[in-house]
Amino acid sequence: MGRARGGAQFAQSIAPRRTGEYAAGIHAEDGGLGGRRRDRPVGLVVATAAPSAAVEWGNDHQNHPHHVLARTIDIVEAV
């Protein structure tokens, strides 16, 4: 969970701040146990705000995708 919390903080720090809704909706969650034998703890970085998909991938109104969560994965996995 420590890595997930750090990832959530990083994602919040690079999130666009047009209204602040997207950044405020980013948090870490306990994903239970994963892996083939279900013996590995899983931490998730989640974006729950309504515009999250548009911010991440873009759409007709949000032409420039920000890839906040994708960039966060790169940082979390590098640690």
Image (cartoon, grey):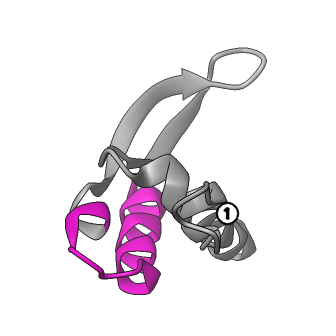
Residue at 45% from the left image edge and 72% from the top image edge: 11
Does residue 19 appear to the left or right of 48 in the view shown? left
Residue 51 lies in the magenta-colored region:
no
Residue at 26% from the left image edge and 55% from the top image edge: 25
Q: Camera-side residue: 69 or 1?
A: 69
Residue at 45% from the left image edge and 57% from the top image edge: 4
Dot 1 amino acid type: Ala
Instruction: Determine the image quadrant of residue 78.
Output: bottom right
Does residue 15 appear to the left or right of 27 in the view shown? right
Q: Camera-side residue: 39 or 58?
A: 58
Pointer 1: residues within 10 angstroms few (<14), some, or many (20+)? few
Does residue 63 appear to the left or right of 12 in the view shown? right
- Residue 66 at what x, y percent from top left? 60, 73
Residue sitting farthest toward the right: 36
Q: Main secondary structure of the magenta part?
A: helix
- Residue 72 at what x, y percent from top left? 59, 69
- Residue 42 at what x, y percent from top left? 53, 37
Q: Camera-side residue: 64 or 78?
A: 64
Residue at 64% from the left image edge and 69% from the top image edge: 65
Position of 35 relative to 64 (above/below): above
Position of 53 relative to 66 (above/below): above
Q: In the rendered view of the protein, which quadrant contains the C terminus?
A: bottom right
Q: Camera-side residue: 22 or 62?
A: 62
Q: Which residues are magenta?
A: 1-22
Position of 55 relative to 48 (above/below): below
Position of 22 relative to 44 (above/below): below
Does residue 59 appear to the left or right of 50 in the view shown? right
The residue that mark 1 highlights is 70
Residue 4 lies in the magenta-colored region:
yes
